[in-house]
Image (cartoon, rainbow, N blue to C red):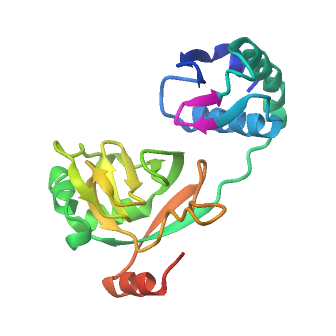
Amino acid sequence: MAGLFEKAVLRLMGDRGLLVEYGDSISPDINVKVRTMAMVIADENPDGVVEVIPTYRSLLIVYDPLVTDIMTLEEALQSMEIRLDQLEIPPPSTVEIPVLYGGDNGPDIEFVADAHNMTAEDVIRIHSGAEYQVYMIGFTPGFPYLGGLPEELHTPRLESPRSLVLAGSVGIANNQTGIYPVDSPGGWRLIGRTPLKLFNPLKENPFLYRAGDMIKFVRISEQEYHRILSEGNA
């Protein structure tokens, strides 16, 4: 990863942010670079850095302009880069997410099936048969943007978003799949729902997963869905 910083594009984001872009495409290699640099910054904890937000292909560094400035921050980033080759990213955890597919919980599954000349069972088999990398978390607290959706299921989002999507809903939008952790508006095609509580602000780690983890969707029955729901998973 040597020379990563030299190839990065830096953009000012107002008077408190520095955006560091490591590429212009969504790829596992670029995302590893983003997450590695985020780990180095967190470990070094340079003066004035308030928050580090990793995304698909870039890193947003929020800083206090009363403590540091852009020149100092750039110099700190350059010095940190020598550690990139020495740092090992921990192996990803695989998080299983139980899903009740179709019915009221997946009102768009038939649309997805028809769009690809397949059955709803095909959609379920393909969707639950893959593993998905968590590239980033955003939009709402705990919303995972997942890469690795099989091409057979790539489906455009809704033309007009719903005003309410229930927490736990699993959706597809173009080449991505994701899970709504809280009730919110949304325009993704809904194919199922998980009974798990994906976001708990009272916990030290409020999310079930983090960027870099792998997600595996596991099909469950309606009976299993209600059992997990009744047991709670807070």
Residue ranking furthest to the top: 71
Q: Write down the quadrant of residue 79 in the picture.
A: top right
In this orientation, which residue lies closer to the viewer: 3 or 144? 144
Q: Is 59 included in the stretch rendered in magenta? A: yes
- Residue 102 visible in the displayed image: no
Q: Residue at x 75, y 34 (%)?
A: 41
Relative side of 84 to 121, left or right: right
Relative side of 233 to 162, left or right: right
User: Residue 184, image x and y in percent?
Assistant: 32, 55
Q: Residue at x 37, y 85 (%)?
A: 226
Residue ranking furthest to the front: 66
In this orientation, which residue lies closer to the viewer: 76 or 107? 76
In this orientation, which residue lies closer to the viewer: 196 or 171? 196
Q: Write down the quadrant of residue 207 in the picture.
A: bottom right
44 versus 10 height, above or below: below
Q: Residue at x 54, y 36 (%)?
A: 55
User: Residue 38, image x and y in percent?
Assistant: 69, 36
Q: Residue at x 62, y 66 (%)?
A: 203
Relative side of 138 to 186, left or right: right
Q: Which residues are magenta?
A: 52-62
40 versus 169 height, above or below: above
Total label count? 0
Relative side of 166 to 232, left or right: left
User: Residue 148, image x and y in percent?
Assistant: 45, 48
Q: Is 160 included in the stretch rendered in magenta? A: no
- Residue 83 visible in the displayed image: yes
Image quarter where the C terminus lies is: bottom right
Image quarter where the N terminus lies is: top right
**Secondary structure, magenta segment, majority class:** strand
7 versus 106 height, above or below: above
